[in-house]
Structures are given as structure tokens and as C-alpha cells.
Image (tube, rainbow, N blue to C red):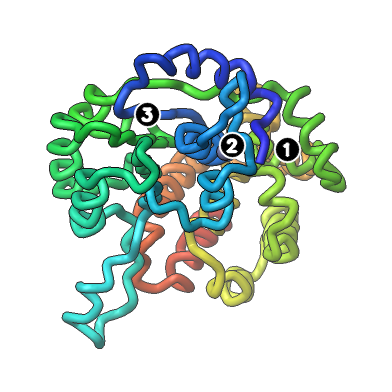
Amino acid sequence: MALYPWQQQAWQQLNLSRQQWPHAVLLSGPQGTGKLDFALQLAQSLLCETPHADYAPCGSCPSCTWFAAGTHPDFREITPRSDDDKEDEKPDSKKRVVQQINIKQVRELTDFVNLSSHRQGYRVTLLHPAEVLNHAAANALLKTLEEPAPGAIFILITHQLSRVLPTIRSRCRLFPLPTPDQTQAAAWLAQQQVADAPRWLARAGNLPLAAKALADNEHLPAWQTLLEALAAPRGFDVLKQAEALHKLELPMVVSWLQKWAYDLLSLKLAKQVRYHPDLQSALQQQAQKLPLDGLLAWQKQLNLAQRSAHHPLNTKLAIEQLLIGYTDL
Ligand SMILES: [Zn+2]
């Protein structure tokens, strides 16, 4: 695994601290720019027994071999887990996906953090994204960050720094990771042999990894159908669209609608499109027809829906309401 071209300088800069490595770093930046790969490279490098002069991991020592296999005894990765315990209590209740890092996960770390390492080096914990630590978990983690055991190292990642609890932030060394400019992003996508790269880059708001994920997304036909419906001058059949979309992840569907709303407003207010440059003329027609206050209200409706999209009561109904919000404009 290599760093992305736009991360080289950040890598050098962060590694200037190698002699006095902070026990916790918090890497921040927008989602879809490669922060996780940077963090994994850093973790592997800290554990590597014979790193290169630029601190790139050697890739061949026992430590690197374990790391690549996902079995390094001195590495832990903590990511959101759905709350299984609650489901057990109410087996009949609707499945609720809780996207958070809970206290049980942080407690499970205690032994790992406090025991001595298997390889006489660091013990590295990678935790991401830090903004979904729930309150109890954050408090438990704070104790560990305040009194770090010798050799215990934390790497935290956040897509939204403002949502990370200040108490956690203040105990970490903050390190913002760069977002590539359009040229770097387009060059990288072309290297990945993504067909129609400029289109996906625009759809992803110029974030290259997000663009690649979009281009590889199996639900592209559904998105395309939705866009055609939204662009249709005479409206569309809401129930049919909702039926076609309701088995997909609601946050994804809402994000498609949010991008459409963003471009309509952006055209109205600034005569620019961001996400759908290939659909500019259809957007233009809609933007002229639709009232500004109505569009702003629809955008607000979408933003509210996105906030509760991880635990919808009824996905089909939620999508219907959002589409009616649009057709009623
Ligand atoms: Zn190595």
C-alpha cells in the first residue's frame, strides 16, 4: 500500500516528530480523500522493525507480514459496531442500525493498551471515525488518553472535526490531512482506469476516493433513473420511484437528492453546477421553473432526513415524502 500523491508532503511533515512521537494523533479531513490509507500506512510504519529512511514500512519484516495479513498482535482497529445487545433485549423490534463506537469496544481495549507489546515496540490503536464515539465511550477513552501506558499509541481519524468532543481533541495532536486539487484528483482517477472520470469526480464533489467508489457503485443504474425522473420537465410517478429505491440504503438515496437540490440552488444563486455538470441544461430548466423559497425548504427537509436516515421507521414512506417535497414545489 502506498500513500496517495497528495499525501507525500503531509507524511514527511508528520514524521518530523518521530523522535518525540505524540501518544495520540487525530487525523482530520473530508471523507473520500484517503485518510484511512494514510493512517494504516502510519500504523504499519510505527510497528515495522526495519522501516526505510523516509519511514515507509519495509513490507517484508515479520511485523509487516502480520500487518498485511491483519493478524498483528500489537495492532487494534476500532470502528462503529451496531448495538447487538439492544436488539437481543427486544427481538421483535425493528432492526436498528446504530452507527457508533460504544463503551464495550473501548473497554475491550484496556488490556491491550496496558499489557506489554509482543514485539517490544509500540502497541497501536486505530480508531475511526472519532466523531461517532458515544458519550460513555469517549469518557472511557479519555482516561486512557490522559494516562497513556508506555508504548501505547493512538491514531484517530475524523471526517468532521467539529463533531469530535473537545475533551478528546485536546488530548490529541491535531493533524489535518490535505484534500487534492482537481488536477491531482483527476490524474489519480485516470491512473485507476476509471471510465468517465470527470463525471464521477464532479458527482463526488471532487473527492477522488469517493469518486472511485461512485464509479464502482452497483446502484448506479438506480441513481441514473432517479436523476432522469428529477430532470423530467413534467414530473414523475412518486410511488413508482419510491418502490424502485426503497431497498437501497436511505442515507445514500438522500445524498443523491441532496446533491440535486444543491445544484438547483447553486444554479439559481450563483449560476454554477457542482455535482452534475453533464446534466446542466436539464437542471437549468428545473431551476428556472422552481421557486427559491420552495427549494430552500426542500433542502432543509432533505438535511433533516439525512440526520435520521440511519434509523428510518419506514424507508419507502421516507423516500415518498422527500419526492413529494420535490414534485409539490
Ligand atoms: Zn517492516
Circle nearer the N terminus (2, 3): 3
Q: Quadrant of residue 223?
A: bottom right
For the residue pair 126 and 307, the one nearer the viewer reads as 126
Task: Give the amino acid at mark 1.
Answer: Leu
Which residue occupies the foreground of this view, 190 or 9? 9
Instruction: Using the rendered image of the protein, determine whether residue 304 is visible from the camera's viewpoint.
Output: no
Q: Nearer the viewer, residue 163 or 329?
A: 163
The residue that appears at 17% across and 80% down in the rendered structure is 89
Q: Residues within 10 Å of mark 3 (few under 14, many from 20)?
A: many
Q: Kindly identify the residue that appears in the image at 39 percent across and 73 percent down.
A: 314
Residue 32 screen position, x and y as percent: 58, 39
Q: Any mark on residue 218, and which?
A: none
Residue receiving disc 2: 34
Q: CA distance from mark 2 to mark 1?
A: 15 Å
Residue carrying label 1: 201
Q: Contact, CB < 8 Å: mark 2 with mark 1?
A: no
The percent coordinates of residue 82 (x first, y second) are 33, 65
- Residue where numbered disc 3 is placed: 26
